[in-house]
Image: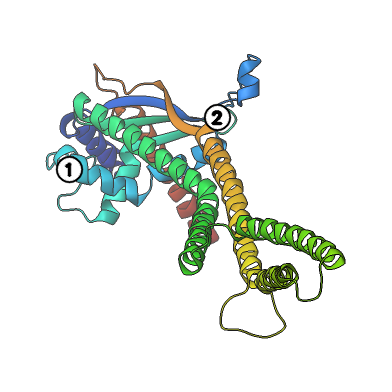
């Protein structure tokens, strides 16, 4: 009986006294939310009146389930709300938080006052936050929703950045290549004083054809003069001089297009070849830029189509009466544990005594 009194009655009386005369009332705030993933339909689907709205994102909900109990969440709550001013209670040392707690102690206490219920099938998260005042409980619950929204927005921003980063890098490379190609074309035009060698060459070819036509006409006229004129006729000399001048001009024009002899001046064939290389590089750079620009726009549109957000189906509630600590339940559990432990110790004692 003395052992029963010391082991069961006295501890139970202490627990009853603490629960009903020392422990302060605690108020609970409930909030429920989930992570929704929504994808806007493409333009063709929108024209057809089709929309595609996906359900909850279980992977993001798993992240939130871990994040709410993490040290990062505790640090954010302590930084914004000062958990010490909310939970430190010297009059209730068991249910209150110890003064000047370390971050590890804060995290342990946080898991006592913030309880997360996660339905893996539906992807719904429900939180129960307790505090010594209804307002504080609601403030903490609102902070949890706010930080959860922030972390989901950060994850969405990171996913969008990953989606568009490679396309943007490729676009930047093609823009730089296009700039270099245009600069090379401008340098070529400044050095040669020729805007378009191909068009300039066509002009010289037309001049050469005209000279050949004039040469043929001059030769015919010279032959006609030779048939009718006598030896030493000045018309023959003048005709021969005209033919010689036209032939020299034709030779000069042909030398513009290239010669087997290397000269310091650039021939037209060399200029045309150099210009064609630059023009091909410019055309290829321009095509690459257009392709990269289209790819970047597509990646950006794809990133904008996908969005994730925290959808609260139950906003943080404001308690009207204290639910915790559940004094009757704790009292019964304490009495049951004391009685069970008392019976076990008695059985052990009598078993050892019988063995003697």
Residue at the spot 66% in from the left edge and 15% down from the top edge: 48
Residue at the far front in the pictured view: 230
| Residue density around tag 1, few if under 14, some if 14–19, many if 20 or more, within 10 Å | few
Q: Which residue is mark 1?
A: 82
Horizontally, residue 169 falls left or right of residue 225, namely left
Q: Which residue is mark 2?
A: 56
Q: Earlier in the sequence, mark 1 or mark 2?
A: 2
Q: In the image, residue 217 lies at what x, y percent?
A: 78, 58
How many numbered circles does the render carry? 2
For residue 39, which numbered disc appears in the image?
none
Residue at the spot 69% in from the left edge and 72% down from the top edge: 241
Query: Element type at marker 1?
Result: loop
| Residue density around tag 2, few if under 14, some if 14–19, many if 20 or more, within 10 Å | many
Is residue 93 at least partly visible in the picture? no
Q: In the image, residue 83 lies at what x, y percent?
A: 20, 42
Q: Quadrant of residue 231?
A: bottom right
Cα distance between the residues tagged 1 and 2:
33 Å
Q: Of 252 and 4, which appears nearest the observer?
A: 252
Is residue 46 at least partly visible in the picture? yes
Query: Element type at marker 2?
Result: loop
Q: In the image, residue 340 lies at what x, y percent?
A: 44, 41
**Quadrant including the N terminus:** top left
Q: Of 346 and 126, which appears nearest the observer?
A: 126
Image vertical order of residue 286 relative to residue 190, above or below: above
Residue at the far right in the pictured view: 227
């Amino acid at each position: 009986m003395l052992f029963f009194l010391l082991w069961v009655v006295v501890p139970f009386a202490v627990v009853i006294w603490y629960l009903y005369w020392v422990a302060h009332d605690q108020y609970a705030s409930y909030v429920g939310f989930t992570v929704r993933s929504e994808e806007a339909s493409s333009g063709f689907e929108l024209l057809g009146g089709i929309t595609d709205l996906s359900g909850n994102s279980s992977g993001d909900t798993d992240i939130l389930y871990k994040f709410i109990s993490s040290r990062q969440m505790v640090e954010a709550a302590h930084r914004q709300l000062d958990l010490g001013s909310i939970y430190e209670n010297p009059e209730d040392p068991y249910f209150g938080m110890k003064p000047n707690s370390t971050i590890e102690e804060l995290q342990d206490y946080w898991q006592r006052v913030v309880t997360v219920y996660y339905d893996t099938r539906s992807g719904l998260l429900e939180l129960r936050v307790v505090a010594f005042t209804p307002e504080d409980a609601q403030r903490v619950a609102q902070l949890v929703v706010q930080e959860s929204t922030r972390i989901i927005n950060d994850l969405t921003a990171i996913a969008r950045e990953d989606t568009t980063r490679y396309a943007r890098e490729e676009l930047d490379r093609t823009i730089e290549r296009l700039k270099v190609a245009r600069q090379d074309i401008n340098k070529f035009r400044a050095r040669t004083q020729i805007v378009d060698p191909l068009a300039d060459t066509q002009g010289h070819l037309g001049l050469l054809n005209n000279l050949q036509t004039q040469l043929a006409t001059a030769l015919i006229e010279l032959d006609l003069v030779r048939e009718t004129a006598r030896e030493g006729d000045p018309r023959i000399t003048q005709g021969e001089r005209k033919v010689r001048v036209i032939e020299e001009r034709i030779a000069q024009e042909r030398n513009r297009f290239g010669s087997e002899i290397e000269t310091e001046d650039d021939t037209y064939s060399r200029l045309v070849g150099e210009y064609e290389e630059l023009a091909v590089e410019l055309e290829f750079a321009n095509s690459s830029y257009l392709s990269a620009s289209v790819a970047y726009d597509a990646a950006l549109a794809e990133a904008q189509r996908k969005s994730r957000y925290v959808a609260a189906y139950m906003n943080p509630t404001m308690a009207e009466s204290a639910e915790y600590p559940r004094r009757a339940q704790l009292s019964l559990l304490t009495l049951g544990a004391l009685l069970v432990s008392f019976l076990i110790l008695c059985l052990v004692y009598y078993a050892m005594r019988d063995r003697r």
